[in-house]
Amino acid sequence: MVKGVSEGYKTEQELVGVGYRASNKGQLLELALGYSHNVVFELPNEIKITTTSEKGQNPKVILESSDKQLLGMVAAKIRSLRKPEPYKGKGIKFAGEILRRKAGKSASKK
């Protein structure tokens, strides 16, 4: 069988950072990403969205669709709103994604 029709595709994203939140009302995804305003993202009707926020865990955005290309494009667009930065790792990342971390400035000895 064709996977998209029988099962569908699914991507999961995590919001890593203090005060980062996600909520959805129908096809509107509202994200608090540390900007002075909340970011509202309207999703196409082909995509089903669920957001989870558990205490002690990073908020998660789960996208499901039968169209793999559309799902990937929307997931990339959401991630581009706040890409993970290399020093603290804050931002929107895919679940299971391994980020390359950099060492910060170190005190030099004179």
Image (cartoon, rainbow, N blue to C red):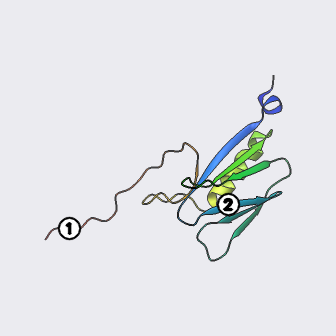
* Picture quadrant of residue 40: bottom right
Residue plotted at (78% across, 35% down): 8
Q: Position of residue 88 (x, y in %)?
A: 44, 60
Residue sitting farthest toward the left: 110
Q: Position of residue 6 (x, y in %)?
A: 82, 29
User: Foreground: 18 or 7?
Assistant: 18
Q: Quadrant of the C terminus?
A: bottom left
Q: Where is residue 74 in the image (x, y as percent from the top left)?
A: 73, 52
Is 82 placed above or below 6 here?
Answer: below
Is 58 placed above or below 69 here?
Answer: below
Residue 84, disc: none
State left or right for residue 89 relative to residue 2.
Answer: left
User: Foreground: 83 or 40?
Assistant: 40
Return the disc, 1 or 2, that comes first in the chain's sequence. 2
Residue plotted at (53% across, 44% down): 97
Q: Quadrant of the N terminus?
A: top right
Residue plotted at (53% across, 57% down): 84
| Amino acid type of the residue tagged 2 in the rendering | Ala
**Which structural element holds mark 1?**
loop
| Amino acid type of the residue tagged 1 in the rendering | Ser
Residue 22, disc: 2
Query: Which residue was labeled with disc 1?
Result: 108
